[in-house]
Image (cartoon, grey):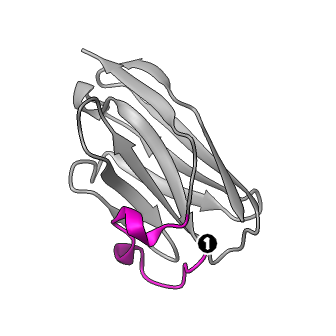
Amino acid sequence: QVQLVESGGGLVQAGGSLRLSCAASGRTSSNLAVGWFRQGPGKAREFVAAITWNRSYGDSVKGRFTISRDNAKNTVSLQMNSLQPEDTAVYFCAASQQGMYSAVYYPTENRYDYWGQGTQVTVSS
């Protein structure tokens, strides 16, 4: 089992930045694939980014968001820059213990086994 806890959400003005963190505990390893998804009000859950030995991003965040990992601390971060109101959502991190593939393999929810509870990001205009 892997437990995931997100942090770093909050309220920010348009054009601002936030950094989210996902702390993993339990049966973690450097082979853990970790992804970020988001779900805005009245919207379906959307892929944001994933990291294995490389990185993958959803089209709506490319060039603005950066995913990174610190294996020593078992954390994955999501640096979000140039935030816009449409980025308002609950952000979830997810993990798969089958993390040996390219990050492009993990753009859908069914690739993941574990999910955090989510952290709210609100961007005001």
Residue 125 located left or right of residue 89:
left
Residue 60 painted magenta: no
**Quadrant of the drawing holding the N terminus:** bottom right
**Residue 84 at x, y percent in the picture:** 26, 28
The tally of labels here is 1
In this view, the residue in front, 46 or 79, is 46
Q: Amino acid at mark 1?
A: Leu
**Residue 85 at x, y percent in the picture:** 25, 25
Residue 98 painted magenta: yes
Prevailing secondary structure of the magenta residues: loop
| Residue 55 in view (yes/no) | no
- Residue at the farthest bottom position: 100
Q: What residue appears at the point 52 percent right and 51 percent down from the top-left corner? A: 93
**Residue 118 at x, y percent in the picture:** 52, 39
**Does 5 sit above or below residue 109?**
above
Residue 120 located left or right of residue 5:
left
Q: What residue appears at the point 31 percent right and 47 percent down from the top-left corner? A: 45
Q: What residue appears at the point 56 percent right and 49 percent down from the top-left corner? A: 77
**Residue 111 at x, y percent in the picture:** 43, 71
**Does 86 sit above or below residue 47?**
above
**Quadrant of the drawing holding the C terminus:** top left
Q: What residue appears at the point 39 percent right and 62 percent down from the top-left corner? A: 109
**Does 92 sit above or below residue 124?**
below
Residue 98 located left or right of residue 47:
right
The residue to which callout 1 is attached is 32
Q: Which residues are magenta?
A: 97-113
